[in-house]
Structures are given as C-alpha cells and as structure tokens.
C-alpha cells in the first residue's frame, strides 16, 4: 500500500515536471508576436515580393529590347542589300542618259565658244534629242520596273519579319509580366493575411 | 510516518503543479507586458491598388535611352545622287534659258525629272520603313 502511494506520488511529480516543461515551451512558442514585429515582417515580405517581381520582369525587358534591336539590324541589312541591287540596276539603265547629258553639256560649251558655228548649234540640238530620248526610255524601262517590284518585295518582307519578331518578343514579355504580376499580387495577399493574423493574435 | 510521507509527497506534487502554473502565467504575462501596441502601419492595404503599384514598380525600371538607336536613313545616298544629277541639269537649263532657248530648257527639265524620280518611291518607302521601325523600337516597353 505504501509502495503504491509512493509510486503515485512519483507519478504526480513526474507529470508536474513534464507539465512545467510543456507550459514553458508552449508559452514560448504560442506567444503572439508584437504588432511592431508583425508590421516589420509585413514590410519585409512586401520588399521581398517587389524584389522578386522586378527580378522576374527586368531581364524580360532587356531580352525583348535585344531581340527587337537584332531584328531591326537584320531588317536594315536586308533592305540595304536590296537597295544596293536596285541602285545597281537603275544606275546601269541611267548610264546612257547621264552620258548623253555630259555630251550635251560639252556641245553647249563648244557652241557658246563659237557662237557663229551653226554645225555646233546643230550638234547641241542633236545631243539634246538623244538625251531626251534616252531619259524618256527610262520611264518604260523593263529592268527598272522589275527592280522596283523586286525591291518592294524585299522591303515589305523584311518589315513583316521585323514586326513579327517584335510581336513574338512582346507576347513573351507580356506573359512573363503577367506571371510576375500574379505572383506579386499573391505574395502581397499572403503577406497581408499573415499580418492580419499576427495583429489579431497580438490584440488578444 | 506513512501519513507524513504521503503528505510530503502530495505537498511536493502540489508545489510542482503550482510552480508550473506560475511559470506558465509568468511567461504569458511577460509576453503581454512586452507587447507594445503601435498602430499597424501598412495593414490597411487591401491589395486594390496592386496594378497601379506594379506600374510604379515598372516605372522605376524605366530607361528610355535603352530604346534609342542611331538611325541613318538607308536611302540617303540615293537622295544625294539625285541631287547631284539635278544640279547638273540645272546648269543645262540655266544655259538654255540664258540662250533664250525655252524649248530646250523645258526638255532638259523634263529629262531631269525623269532621271531623278526613278528611285523616289524607294527613297520614300525606305524612309517610311526606317521611321516606322524606329518608332516600334522606341515604343517597346521602357519599363
């Protein structure tokens, strides 16, 4: 009987000691954080959310800009190459007219130097007629017409490609921005909920 | 003796329980007394202005100069060449006018117009494309 009582007493003591330990630990872990700490935690969470948002968004902008500039450089190179080819065709076709203009100019100079020489005056007229004929022919030059058409295609195609690249880049960027915005809003909402819960606890 | 021993045991147990309760109470009251109650600073944020805030965040990243680039109109060389050709014909027209030969002056003017207008559609189209492309690059989000 005595032993039983002793055992009971020991058990009570053990339970008490355990209760002490649990009470101390439990009180420490369940202790609500202060309002100031809750606000500070909230501010920290918000700062982290903003930093995360910007870290996600900023590179996407740089990428988009790089892609846009590369696409523009490619467009310009294509157009320049096409224009050089166009100019080459036009220059070849214009050569006769430009030569005729020089011949005409020289004949005018000669005629002015010998104003009484009718042959020279006639040469001026002949050269002017040749010049006029050559330049008029340019208006219906098939090679120039083909060059116009070819270059127009090159130019249009290059511009379309450039715009398409920009559009793809912009969509990718918009997706990144959208995802980052959603995450930012969620992070903020979570931080706010945590803050409100902490404030509620602190006010009890 | 037995009764005393039992009494002592019980006393010890009650003391331990009391001490536990006191310890719990102390912890709890220590927490309460250590909790200042400043007004929540940012807790009024309902999240309604998230989109505006995002724009503000993006604006902080704005760097307009990133989008600028040197634009040399590809067709500038064509314009220069056309101008040189026009100048050559202008001399011819001037001479014809001085000589009182208005018919020749008119022919020369017409020839000059043909020669210098061949690439005008290309010059204009290229310049327009350059301007549009530049506008598109400039128009890329600056944020």
Image: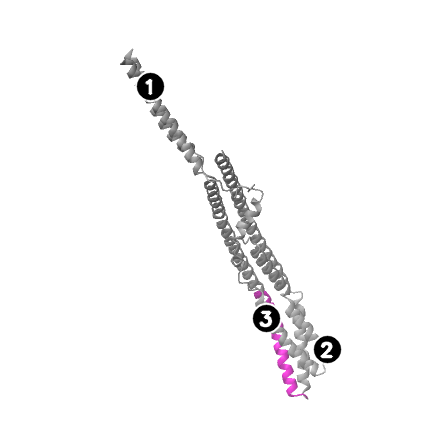
| Range of magenta residues | A87-115
Question: For the residue labelled by badge 1, is the local secondary structure a helix, a strand or a loop?
Answer: helix
Q: Which residue is mark 1?
A: B10
Q: A73 or A26, which lies in front?
A: A26
Question: For the residue labelled by badge 2, is the local secondary structure a helix, a strand or a loop?
Answer: helix
Q: Is residue A16 above or below residue B83?
A: above
Q: CA distance from mark 2 to mark 1?
A: 137 Å
The residue positioned 68% from the left and 69% from the top of the image is A136
Q: Earlier in the sequence, mark 3 or mark 1?
A: 1
Which SS does the magenta portion mostly show? helix
A104 is within the stretch colored magenta: yes
The residue positioned 68% from the left and 83% from the top of the image is A121
Q: Which residue is mark 3?
A: B81
Same chain shared by disc 2 and disc 1: yes
Q: Quadrant of residue A139?
A: bottom right
Q: Which mark is residue A73?
A: none
Q: Which mark is residue B103?
A: 2
Q: Residue furthest top?
A: A1
Give the side of residue A34 with respect to residue A156, left or right.
left
């Amino acid at each position: 009987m005595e032993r039983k009582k002793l055992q009971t007493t020991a058990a009570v003591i053990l339970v008490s000691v355990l209760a002490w330990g649990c009470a101390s630990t439990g009180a420490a872990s369940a202790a609500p954080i202060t309002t100031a700490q809750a606000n500070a935690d909230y501010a920290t969470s918000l700062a982290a959310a903003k930093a995360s948002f910007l870290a996600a968004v900023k590179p996407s902008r740089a990428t988009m800009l790089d892609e846009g500039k590369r696409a523009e450089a490619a467009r310009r190179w294509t157009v320049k190459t096409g224009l050089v080819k166009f100019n080459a065709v036009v220059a070849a076709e214009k050569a006769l007219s430009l030569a005729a203009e020089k011949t005409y100019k020289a004949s005018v100079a000669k005629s002015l130097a010998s104003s009484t020489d009718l042959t020279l005056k006639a040469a001026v007229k002949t050269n002017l007629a040749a010049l006029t004929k050559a330049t008029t022919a340019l208006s219906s030059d098939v090679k120039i017409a083909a060059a116009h058409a070819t270059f127009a295609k090159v130019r249009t195609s290059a511009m379309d490609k450039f715009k398409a690249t920009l559009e793809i880049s912009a969509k990718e960027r918009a997706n990144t921005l959208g995802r980052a915005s959603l995450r930012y809003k969620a992070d903020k909402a979570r931080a706010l909920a945590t803050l409100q819960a902490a404030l509620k606890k602190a006010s009890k | 003796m037995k009764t005393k021993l039992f009494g002592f045991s019980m006393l010890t147990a009650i003391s331990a329980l009391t001490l536990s309760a006191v310890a719990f109470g102390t912890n709890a009251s220590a927490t309460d007394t250590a909790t200042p109650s400043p007004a929540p600073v940012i807790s009024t944020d309902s999240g309604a202005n998230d989109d505006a805030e995002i724009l503000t965040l993006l604006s902080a990243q704005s760097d307009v100069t990133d989008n600028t680039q040197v634009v040399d109109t590809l067709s500038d060389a064509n314009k220069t060449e056309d101008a040189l050709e026009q100048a050559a014909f202008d001399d011819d027209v001037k001479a014809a006018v001085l000589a009182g030969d208005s018919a020749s002056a008119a022919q020369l003017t017409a020839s000059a117009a043909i020669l210098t207008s061949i690439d005008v559609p290309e010059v204009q189209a290229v310049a327009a494309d350059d301007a549009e492309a530049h506008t598109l690059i400039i128009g890329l989000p600056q944020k």
